[in-house]
Amino acid sequence: MTRVRLLPVLALAALLAAAPLAAALGASTAVLRVRGHDGLGVETHLPAITGAGVTVAVLDTGVDVEHPTFAGAFLAGLDVSSPCSNPVSDPAGTDATCYAARDVSTAPDDTNGHGTHVASILLGRGDAAGGVPKGVAPGAKLVVVKIAPSLASLESGGLLRGLKWIEEFNAGRTRFGQPTGAERVRVVSVSFSTHAPGSTSSPEAQAIDRLSAAGVAVVVAAGNCGPAPSSADRQLCGGDTGSNRVGNPGMACAAITVGAVDDGGSKDRADATLAGFSSRGPGGASTCPGAIKPDVVAPGVAITGASHDAVPGAARGARESSGTSQATPHVAGILALMLQANASLAPADLKRLLASTATLPDGSRPPNPRPDWGHGLVDAFAAVRAAMGGNKPPRVSLVTDAAHGSVPVGTRVVFEASGSTDDLGIASIAWRFDDGVRASGPRANRTFDTPGARSVEVAVTDLEGAVARANATIRVIAPDRTTDEPPVARLTFEPSAVVVGEPVVFDGRASTDDVGVVEWSWDVHDDGTVDARGERVRWTGFGEPSVVVVRLTVRDTLGQAATAVGTLLVERAPVEDPAPATPSAPRDATPPTLSIVSPEDGARRLEGEILVSWRAGDDAVRVVVWLDDVAVHETDRGGAGRVALRASAGPHTLLLKAWDEAGNAAIARASFSAYAAEPLEPADAGEPDVEPAPAPRGVPGPALLAIALGLAAAARLTRRR
């Protein structure tokens, strides 16, 4: 059997033991923009993205899950460090039936400490008392697969057995049973490598490619045989260091192979340098088209993580270690964040997005992967955003207090963009006016002293640098009261008639003015009280049947006003007829015709007796006449009709409604005004006064005639009702 060795991070850890822990706390995750860097971070701007709902497997020396940093993380585990079948017929011990009966409810303990340290970097919940920072994906679940009890005893068969068991676990062929979608392992972290150059044709590489094809992303350490390894590693690397030293299983085509950088304890990505021990590519014997390993790099020097319970009952705390072993769980944790953001991503998608968002320390992206940095230093924030579909530009809201876009010279105008939104947040808002004046902030104020068209552009920038723009133009006028035209008021109702309790919309947007309408006032009951303001008003205040007179008053920028009056018919809710016992022919929904002949809309009449005439369709069976809001006449016949009414001086509204036998109704409206008769001129002083002759007895005067007409109309209404 081929014996492989875990990355000997303990040798490096001994050299770094004197380094202060505080310098490394959280620095690596800040560099990766997990905790935040340059104003950006997953935890800051996407706080719900923690890896929740994603299960990650750590194939290592076991995990001390009783450490406080793993509280609530453990899901299942198994020790496959020794073969579980015939060592002759199945030397790798991958027989699925061998492990199917084993208990998975207890995590295989870590007597070495390597697996505990790695797992805490990946998904530790944090232990402030013990000095352990949170891992990259503190919301993820943990499956522990122990593939070796110690660094010195690891065999290639242990990795093969672990990879095979993950397949069996996801397929529901273990004692865990069938895992749910959130319990299926989606990411595997493998923090070890051979010291000899790897190959894409090795059994380990082929097993990783198969697992990736089954939907599981595998993250692998590149190895510690770079050009400047530790003295212990140099010995293990056989003195052959430098290029083409990426080992197995990091040469697997589908693997995401990770090199290491030294962040120097800084949270600034620009300070990162490639670790001397990190193995370089392009790799050994490779059959992957255009493959260069490593794929990406991540912090791997002086990384603080959890320490295991080396002596039963001893306190568990924190320690530092270095190696590509420590860089690997950083990347595995980022994949968990990406999968929570978009669970549909396949391993190849994750690899592509991770590579496309990685950068070199100066922020650039190499046109082709490099044998030392790969595609670059991973960026958790950018990778998660890419998994979510990429950055979307801000949505700009630009409003002004200039009604209809016009203001008189000397008027202060407020430009407002505070309603602009972005899924992450707004970084800046900048204003640029056509005269070169600039401003910043959510609001800009300008006073224009010369007439003409003035324009402004607002640029809204989000936290990732995406910019969206909007423009507005203001017409600045120098009004002349001698030539300025008054506004024209127009109103409509939506709908044109309502039943009691139904809402209606009063719409005055059709009102016009040569300068601009700036005020709309609504007097709903025509009683001189302003009941509402605005271009368009929704009203629900009608509790009884009536004819409502609505008055709209509009004003322009100079205060000139105009008024429009409309009438709204408010009816009782119709009583539904019971459904017929047998089907009947469809009801004709065509209403009768109806028109007002006299007085025509807008007419002027002398106050007193007014003759109202109309023409209804012959199918009409009822016609009612309202003067203002009072029903004054009713007839049960269609065709032509007329009635004499009394109208005092002033504006009036006339409303008629006709029904047919099917209940279909038609409405006609007209507005007219009545004016007072002019008084007689006084007689000349030289002429004698002449007494008017008394009216002959028995002949009624105009007042008696009006009373008679009123009594007749009342009698007709009484008979109808």
Image (tube, grey):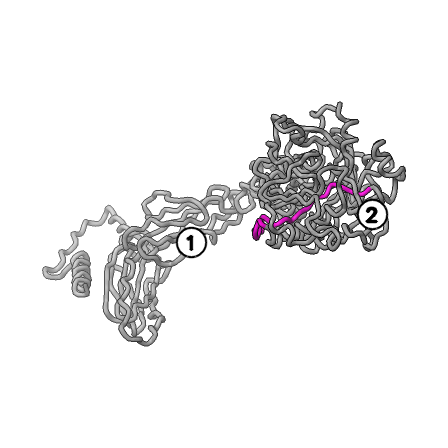
Give the percent coordinates (x, y) of residue 206.
76, 53
Query: Which quarter shows the C terminus?
Result: bottom left
Disc number at residue 315?
Answer: none
Q: Relative to 679, is 49 on the left or the right?
A: right
The residue at which mark 1 appears reads as 491
Give the percent coordinates (x, y) of residue 612.
28, 63
Q: Residue furthest left?
A: 697
Instruction: Determine whether the residue tagged by mark 2 lies in a helix, strand or loop.
Output: loop
Q: Nearer the viewer, residue 513 or 529?
A: 529
Give the percent coordinates (x, y) of residue 534.
44, 46
Q: Is residue 707 above or below residue 62?
A: below
Q: Is residue 189 magenta?
A: yes
Which amino acid does the dot numbered 2 rest on?
Answer: Gly
Residue 420 appears in the figure: no
- The crowding category of the residue bearing disc 1, from other C-alpha atoms within 10 Å (few below 14, some 14 to 19, many at least 20), is many
Instruction: Determine whether the residue tagged by mark 1 lies in a helix, strand or loop.
Output: loop
Give the percent coordinates (x, y) of residue 237.
86, 39
Disc number at residue 198?
Answer: 2
Q: Are marks 2 and 1 in contact (CB under 8 Å)?
A: no
Q: Which residues are magenta?
A: 175-194
What residue is drawn where x is 69% and y is 51%?
A: 85
**Foreground disc of the pair 2, 1:** 2
Q: Nearer the viewer, residue 316 or 525?
A: 316
Query: Can you tell which quarter of the image residue 608 is in?
Result: bottom left
Q: Relative to 482, is 391 on the left or the right?
A: right
| Distance in Å between CA atoms under marks 2 and 1 | 82 Å
* First along the sequence among labels 2 and 1: 2
Which amino acid does the dot numbered 1 rest on?
Answer: Leu
Q: Relative to 658, is 27 on the left or the right?
A: right
Query: Can you tell which quarter of the image residue 719 is in?
Result: bottom left
What residue is drawn where x is 88% and y is 42%?
A: 243
